[in-house]
């Protein structure tokens, strides 16, 4: 079930609205000396292809963006803890500047939700008199905010509030709290006063427990769908977030100081940057278009160039990944960005000599911009990840075909840009096919490699939260609840495991994925890549083979047991959508915007716009007039999931 759409014309913030909010918060922060810890939940059981290396060597954009926003607004006593680097971090034992922090935030994807829950549980162990305000957010919370609240009276825990949006929502929440906070009052006590008095109800993008008994949520209030930031130039500078990173450690506590600037490049050699957001395609398995309210949002080329140059100078960062949904989505804006970057010089040299970057595009748009690929190369682009899905367009049609995909890959290769295909395996696709049509998984992998692919991503199609197919897939009984006695756990929803299939022998699908990786990544291809590389970039092909072989070993190790369970059978299936067990409503008592079918409370139906009540303006604390509010929260502007 996709996120509902706001009323037409009310999807985006007004120009300058985030800038104004940042200025107001700087004034409030001067008399509110708060400490904040931001944790990025990470389940190490997800460490396999296609995420190997990048999962631990690229600081996630979401938590870094939130850290940047807090520092920009004057809350500089902030620390970012990555469970990728700090697996034993325990919130109950955290101290910042010798004290329990005032605010504890946790951000999570769906596949890391078990670790996210453990972090919130541990934070709730802190004595209530000293407990920080607990705020949860990230892609998991955008679509399933109710999972951050306990329903077991014998095991009470939960976040104080969940942010279901981007930076603007979080900063709007902080503005309300700091405006009414009494001198030396714990910020959590301030939050409780604001919640009980209804001051939070007009901030779209929050979910909180209205009433609690013994620490268990009895009812959730959903303030609606966020307004989105349209002009991404209004975001705080990402360079600020890199100053807040907790050094890697096996200890449960925090160190006295964050990572020094000279170590950032070693720990995170790849930097993720928000460039654009949104995609014009409406694939039923993808939540991105609905999340972006069918809007396309961009940064200017000059802002992107400035960010890359500054990150390079301050931290020595040279490799960037654009956190885009489809960078080639809008030809005019894409060309503007590329032309600006191509003209940019860093320390007297063209940007292509100093910076290497890549991002995500589609086959259709790559062919549409074929005349601009040389410009992209001069702008520093060295790799593009393409959503091929299925070359024959049997699974989904996005303007791709066998000939078009091959042509796009060969074009990229001829311009010195590495094509990086992303594929989806499905029930109807065999491992190998006969005849002229390359329908088989290995047939397509062979064609892609021949056309110049230096990497391969193969994932089993799996229901994604927030997508059009999510609820129907569960209701049809396609999704597994358990296999041979082993329950399907959140970390298994990363599409590496076959957890949703109608195939009579699903174990074959699991082995097909392994076979595709073994075919593409192996010692023979590594040695061939040293002599006859597919890429014009020095050793890029061979290095990707090394990374791929290591990731393949991890993938086989973690998924082969699941394949054997699938062989044994005894598959139990879900027939209901995993909705909230806690009643949900909007502030006026009506339908909650984030509620899925089966949620207790007001009747849940599919709607196209958010109830008008959620779009009401919020009075500025301490003033006699109203101002409109919008989006924001614990995820980056382009990181829905």
Image: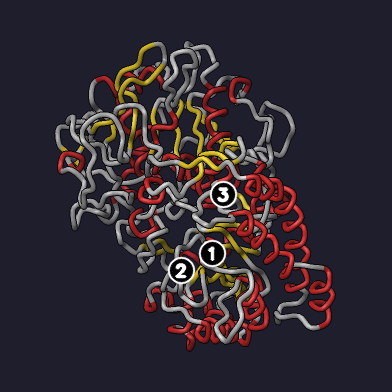
- Whichever of labels 1 and 3 marks the residue nearer the N terminus, that label is 3
The percent coordinates of residue 378 (x first, y second) are 57, 81
Kindly state the secondary structure of the residue where label 2 is placed: loop
User: Is label 2 in contact with label 1 (beta carbons under 8 Å)?
Assistant: yes
Front one among 110 and 240: 110
Drawn side of residue 539 relative to residue 336, left or right = right
- What residue is at 39 percent from the left and 64 percent from the top? 283
Number of the label disc, if any, that sits on residue 60: 3
The percent coordinates of residue 461 (x first, y second) are 51, 58
Drawn side of residue 203 relative to residue 443, left or right = left
Rendered position, 447 above or below 564: below
Give the foreground label among 2 and 3: 2
User: Is label 1 in contact with label 3 (beta carbons under 8 Å)?
Assistant: no
- What residue is at 55 percent from the left and 58 percent from the top? 460
The percent coordinates of residue 200 (x first, y second) are 27, 30
**On the image, numbered disc 2 is attached to which residue?**
395
- What residue is at 45 percent from the left and 83 percent from the top? 369
């Amino acid at each position: 079930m996709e996120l509902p759409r706001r009323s037409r014309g009310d999807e985006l913030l007004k120009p300058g609205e985030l800038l104004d909010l940042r200025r107001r918060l700087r004034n409030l922060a001067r008399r509110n000396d708060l400490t904040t810890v931001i944790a990025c939940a990470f389940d190490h059981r997800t460490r396999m292809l296609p995420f190997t290396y990048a999962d631990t060597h690229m600081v996630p954009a979401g938590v870094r963006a939130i850290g940047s926003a807090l520092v920009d607004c004057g809350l500089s006593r902030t620390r970012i803890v990555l469970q990728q680097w700090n697996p034993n971090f325990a919130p109950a034992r955290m101290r910042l500047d010798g004290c329990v922090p005032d605010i504890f935030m946790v951000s999570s994807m769906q596949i890391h939700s078990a670790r996210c829950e453990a972090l919130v549980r541990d934070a709730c162990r802190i004595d209530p008199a000293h407990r920080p305000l607990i705020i949860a957010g990230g892609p998991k919370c955008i679509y399933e905010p109710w999972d951050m609240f306990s329903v077991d009276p014998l095991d009470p825990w939960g976040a104080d509030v969940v942010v279901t949006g981007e930076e603007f929502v979080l900063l709007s929440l902080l503005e309300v709290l700091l405006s009414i906070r009494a001198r030396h009052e714990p910020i959590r006590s301030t939050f409780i006063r604001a919640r009980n008095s209804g001051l939070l109800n007009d901030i779209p993008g929050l979910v909180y427990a209205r009433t609690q008994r013994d620490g268990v949520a009895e009812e959730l209030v959903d303030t609606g769908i966020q307004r989105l930031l349209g002009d991404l130039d209004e975001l705080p500078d990402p360079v600020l977030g890199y100053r807040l990173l907790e050094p890697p450690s096996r200890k449960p506590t925090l160190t006295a100081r964050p990572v020094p600037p000279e170590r950032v490049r070693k720990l995170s050699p790849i930097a993720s940057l928000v460039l654009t957001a949104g995609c014009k395609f409406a694939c039923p398995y993808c939540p991105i278009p609905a999340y972006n309210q069918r809007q396309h949002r961009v940064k200017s080329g000059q802002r992107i160039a400035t960010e890359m140059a500054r990150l390079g100078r301050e931290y020595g960062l040279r490799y960037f990944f654009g956190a885009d949904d489809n960078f080639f989505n809008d030809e005019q804006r894409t060309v503007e960005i590329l032309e600006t970057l191509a003209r940019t010089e860093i320390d007297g040299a063209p940007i292509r000599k100093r910076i290497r970057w890549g991002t995500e595009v589609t086959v259709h748009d790559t062919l549409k911009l074929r005349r601009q690929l040389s410009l992209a190369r001069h702008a520093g682009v060295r790799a593009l990840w393409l959503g091929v899905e299925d070359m024959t367009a049997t699974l989904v049609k996005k303007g791709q075909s066998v000939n078009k995909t091959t042509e796009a890959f060969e074009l990229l290769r001829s311009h010195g840009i590495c094509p990086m295909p992303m594929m989806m395996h499905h029930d109807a696709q065999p491992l190998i096919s006969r005849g002229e049509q390359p329908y088989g998984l290995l047939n397509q992998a062979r064609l892609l490699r021949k056309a110049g692919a230096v990497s391969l991503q193969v994932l089993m199609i799996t229901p994604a939260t927030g997508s059009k197919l999510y609820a129907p897939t569960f209701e049809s009984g396609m999704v597994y609840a358990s296999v041979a006695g082993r329950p399907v756990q959140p970390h298994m929803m990363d599409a590496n495991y076959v957890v949703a299939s109608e195939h009579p022998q699903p174990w074959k699908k699991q082995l097909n994925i392994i076979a595709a990786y073994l075919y593409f990544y192996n010692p023979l291809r590594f040695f061939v890549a040293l002599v006859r590389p597919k890429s014009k970039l020095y050793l890029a092909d061979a290095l990707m083979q090394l990374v791929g072989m290591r990731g393949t070993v991890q993938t086989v190790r973690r998924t082969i047991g699941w394949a054997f369970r699938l062989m044994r059978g005894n598959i139990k299936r879900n027939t209901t959508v995993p909705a909230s067990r806690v009643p949900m409503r909007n502030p006026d008592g009506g339908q909650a915007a984030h509620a899925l079918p089966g949620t207790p409370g007001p009747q849940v139906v599919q709607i196209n716009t958010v109830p008008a009540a959620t779009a009401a303006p919020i009075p500025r604390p301490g003033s006699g007039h109203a101002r409109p509010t919008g989006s924001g929260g614990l995820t980056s502007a382009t990181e829905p999931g």
